[in-house]
DNA sequence: GTGTTTGCAAAGTGTTTGCAATTTA
DNA sequence: TAAATTGCAAACACTTTGCAAACAC
């Protein structure tokens, strides 16, 4: 019997399974669910805890450790990437291409910033003997308190 | 009796005490020592653990919790600032002015990048209703493996 | 003396690991 | 059936907290 989270429509489960297969991951019930939650609504950013809560709300039984393990498997497979949030918490991001982030303080929420939107042509040369692995830009935001004239 | 870490010369202790007073912090033995370790060698970046080890190496008795508490007091006083490292660990930085960082993977080391060295004039406008609190740029480095043609 | 600061040990977060039981192919 | 995956609980690393004892002024 194919792994089929009861919480998912056949079509949703099918899509999720296909995605997993594309990344050489066995479509277990837990992976199908988590993959669906991650990808069904377009690009998104979650912490393990957020996803765990969604999974529980869906009624599917699974454990926090499985969420972590599964997300790390997704990362290793190249399906998603990780990102360190300002609070030192690990975020998981469905967009794997190079890009940056807004982080909304108070709302605990990430928003993508396309790589092209930040001009990094002016970053300084690394010290001799070192090469640049990557550049992480996080723009911290807060709700604008009534700055309307 | 004035707090005088045995590990410090009178002059060093005096400088450290003066700095603490300038920030309205009582110059206790522990604070004098930690302040000295932080500032005596020019701008630097440390984790609580690094500083704790230095403090221990100096022979002065003090406890990890005191290192954390003291560093947070320094932050609150405006003497230093915090910075989240790529590994999710908290770093303490003697440079409080706006600036960015190189992080050297493998060496677990931070290097300052002056704010002016990164052109942020091109960052995208925040979504309507939000204002920019700050921009954190971390440029991850690795030792260049023999790329010398 | 009085209020501040420290040591200590304990609790707290967020994350990872080891292993037996279950599930997939 | 053989290999991969999960649940569970325990361990883990880092950081914070509560309170009595020690200290600065």
Image (tube, coloured by chain):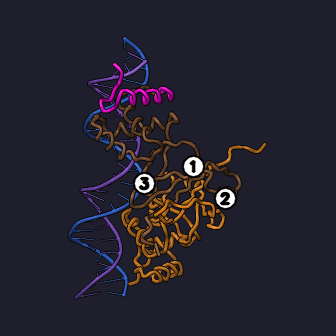
Chain colours: A brown, B orange, C purple, D blue
Q: Which is more N-terminal, label 2 or label 1?
A: 1
Q: Quadrant of the N terminus of chain B?
A: bottom left
Residue under disc 3 on the same chain as residue under disc 2:
yes
Residue B106 seen by the camera? no
Are there few (<14), some (14-19), or many (20+) residues within 10 Å of tag 3?
some
Question: How many numbered marks appear?
Answer: 3
Circles 1 and 2: CB atoms closer than 8 Å: no
Q: Which residues are magenta?
A: A1-24
Whether residue A28 appears in magenta in the rendering, the answer is: no
Circles 3 and 2: CB atoms closer than 8 Å: no
Tell me: residue B20, above or below residue C15: below
Q: Is residue D9 left or right of residue A66?
A: left
Rendered residue at 31%/33% (across/down): A7
Q: Which is more N-terminal, label 1 or label 3?
A: 1
Instruction: Name the residue tied to disc 1.
Output: A99
Rendered residue at 40%/80% (across/down): B26
Q: What is the chain letter for disc 3?
A: A
Circles 3 and 1: CB atoms closer than 8 Å: no
Rendered residue at 51%/27% (across/down): A22
Residue A123: give its label.
Answer: 2
Could you tell me residue B11's position as x and y percent?
Answer: 53, 81
Residue A109: give its label.
Answer: 3
């Amino acid at each position: 019997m194919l792994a089929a989270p009861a919480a998912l429509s056949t079509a949703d489960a099918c899509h999720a399974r296909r995605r997993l297969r594309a990344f050489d991951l066995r479509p277990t019930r837990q992976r199908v669910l988590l993959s669906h939650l991650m990808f069904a609504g377009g690009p998104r950013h979650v912490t393990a805890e957020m996803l765990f809560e969604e999974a529980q709300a869906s009624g599917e039984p699974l454990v926090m450790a499985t969420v972590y393990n599964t997300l790390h498997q997704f990362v290793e497979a190249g399906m998603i990437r990780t990102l360190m949030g300002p609070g030192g918490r690990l975020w998981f991001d469905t967009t794997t291409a190079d890009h940056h982030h807004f982080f909304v303080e108070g709302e605990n929420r990430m928003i993508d910033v396309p790589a092209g939107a930040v001009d990094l042509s002016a970053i300084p040369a690394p010290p001799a003997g070192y090469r640049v692995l990557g550049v992480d830009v996080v723009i911290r935001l807060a709700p604008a308190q009534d700055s309307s004239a």
